[in-house]
Image: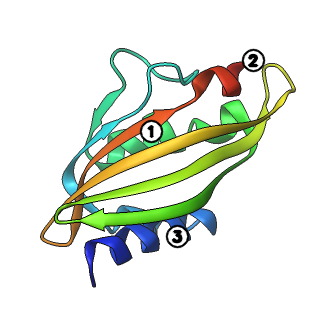
């Protein structure tokens, strides 16, 4: 499987709620960089390891948002990097406002495993 196919598999698993399927693609020491503007981020938004991602990111999504999902527009890859262009959508529970926010993810892979995640997202669209 190519690096691009691995990332596509991760998004497909996330979309169906198959979190174990997503985690199976993570390196045990994955470095996850979440945008500081996300409402649940503490500190610099860097989490190490699948357990930290689950407890600090995945478990917080339904706490802060209804109907949160990622609409993938394009996934492109070169060498060890794969980039997703798309947007987040859902409803901010604190404000009751729906959102559609541009999002870009940069993944780094090594030996068929996701070793690094970097997120760039329009957090202003999410929290208003």
Camera sees residue 103: yes
- Secondary structure at badge 2 equals loop
The answer to whether mark 1 and mark 3 are in CB contact below 8 A is: no
Q: Where residue 108 sits: x, y (%)?
A: 23, 54
- Secondary structure at badge 3 equals helix
Which residue is at a point 64% across and 44% down the rendered structure image?
A: 88
Quadrant showing the N terminus: bottom left
Tell me the distance, in whole angstroms, between the alpha carbons under discs 3 and 2.
29 Å
Q: How many numbered badges does the structure rendering display? A: 3
Which residue is at a point 68% across and 30% down the rendered structure image?
A: 64
Tell me the distance, in whole angstroms, between the alpha carbons under discs 1 and 3.
18 Å
Q: Nearer the viewer, residue 59 or 76?
A: 76
Q: Residue furthest left?
A: 111
Tell me the distance, in whole angstroms, between the alpha carbons under discs 1 and 2.
24 Å
Q: Nearer the viewer, mark 3 or mark 2?
A: 2
Counting residues from the start of the chain, the first of labels 3 and 2 encountered is 3
Quick check: 16 left or right of 5?
right
Whether 42 is drawn above or below 58: the answer is above
Quick check: 3 left or right of 104?
left
Q: Where residue 36 sits: x, y (%)?
A: 44, 20
Give the crowd class for mark 3: few <14, some 14-19, many >=20 residues within 10 Å.
Answer: some
Q: Where residue 70 sits: x, y (%)?
A: 62, 53
The residue to which callout 3 is attached is 13
Counting residues from the start of the chain, the first of labels 1 and 2 encountered is 1
Whether 54 is drawn above or below 18: the answer is above
Which residue is at a point 58% across and 29% down the rendered structure image?
A: 122
Quadrant showing the C terminus: top right
The residue to which callout 1 is attached is 55
Numbered label attached to residue 7? none
Counting residues from the start of the chain, the first of labels 1 and 3 encountered is 3
Q: Residue furthest bottom?
A: 1
């Amino acid at each position: 499987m190519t690096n691009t196919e691995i990332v596509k598999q991760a998004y497909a698993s996330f979309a169906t709620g198959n979190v174990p399927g997503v985690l199976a693609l993570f390196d045990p020491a994955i470095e996850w960089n979440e945008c500081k503007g996300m409402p649940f981020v503490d500190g610099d938004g860097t989490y190490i390891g699948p357990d930290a991602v689950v407890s600090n990111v995945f478990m917080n999504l339904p706490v802060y948002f209804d109907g949160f999902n990622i609409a993938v527009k394009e996934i492109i890859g070169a060498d060890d990097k794969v980039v997703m262009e798309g947007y987040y959508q859902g409803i901010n529970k604190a404000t009751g406002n729906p959102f559609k926010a541009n999002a870009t993810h940069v993944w780094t892979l090594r030996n068929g495993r996701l070793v690094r995640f970097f997120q760039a997202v329009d957090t202003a669209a999410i929290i208003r």
